[in-house]
Image: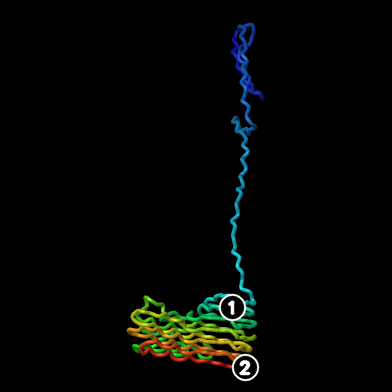
Amino acid sequence: MKKLKCLSVLLCLGFGVLALTGCPNNSNSPSAPVTVIVVETPTYPPCVMNGFTCTPSVTPTPSLTPTLTPTLTITPTITPTPANWVITSPVTLVTGQYSYVSVHVQAGGILNVGGAVTLNLSGYLAVDAGGTIIGDGNGYPIEQGPGAPTTQDAAGGSHGGVGGMDSAGATPGPVYDSSTAPASMGSGGGAGYGQSLCNGSGGGGLLDVNASGGTVTLNGTLSMNGGDVCAVTDYEGYGGGAGGTIYIQAQTITGSGVLRANGAAGASYTYYNNGGGGGGGIIVLSTHSSNTFTGTLSVSGGAAGNYGTGGTGASGSVGITNTTTY
């Protein structure tokens, strides 16, 4: 009789693996126990079956959205100059063109002209008695400008008028600019040899007012003189700066104030050389309708130094026009 072999059975159940081993009990084989082995399958989170490999399902962590701190841009508050500008205290305009409806300089108000300034006005300009527009010495610096002395000497600067020679006979620079439509500042005087002790004398600034559709009333002071020189105690004196420019175009010009673009006096030195005076500047009043201004117009040349034989600067020119068209 043929013997039956022992059997081993593996059953895959939902909770694990059931293993049965043993030999069948029959008349030809001894009875043998049956061994039951239960192998529990560890419990895992839900997974995705891939053949016999259990791969846990992974839920990705969502991307974090970063919290952004916005950049704060601070814009400074700028107080614009009003279209109708009323000046009651000292203010300054540097070289450039400025547009307003009107400018009114009241008593105690000072408009400093820091170079070459043009005012384009759709309305009017008024300078009350006690009000001032000034650019003295704010034109070309010492020894600079088209009319400055060409050598290191103490001659006066030139503009509408020629500057004076110094006491050593140094020649000043040439006159320049237009006598009917001036557009330049005054030139600086010569520095001589005493530059370490004094900055010398700059020329006068430029004030150009275009109020062709309105009225300009001038009862205060408009001054574009050459700058004052210091009293020096060095090798020699300094030349005076030339007067600058006042150029006004308007429908009507009226008032009784003071307009000046005088050359500055030369500086003195008791030992060797004295500076020449600066040449006068240029003033032009141009109107479309009428000019009833009765005040003072001055473009004198500056005096020479007090000692020696320094020359006096020549007077500049005054231009007064009354035109029917521009």
Which coloring applies here?
A: rainbow
The one nearer the camera, 134 or 54, is: 134
Classify residue 63 as left or right of residue 171.
right
Query: Of discs 1 and 2, which sits in the foreground?
Result: 1
Q: Is residue 98 above or below residue 212?
A: above
Residue 281: percent from left, percent from top = 49, 87
151 vs 50: above or below: below
Q: Residue at x 39, y 90 (%)?
A: 311
Image quarter hosting the C terminus = bottom right
Assign the N terminus to one quadrant of the image. top right
- The one nearer the camera, 38 or 139, is 139
Q: Which mark is residue 86?
A: none
Number of on-image labels: 2
Q: Label 2 is placed on what type of residue?
A: Thr
Give the image location of residue 315, x and y in percent: 46, 91
Residue density around tag 1, few if under 14, some if 14–19, many if 20 or more, within 10 Å: some
- The residue indicated by pointer 1 is 108
Q: Position of residue 233 (x, y in %)?
A: 36, 79
Sequence-wise first label, 1 or 2: 1
Please name the residue that numbered disc 2 is placed on. 324
Q: What secondary structure is found at the residue carrying circle 2? A: loop
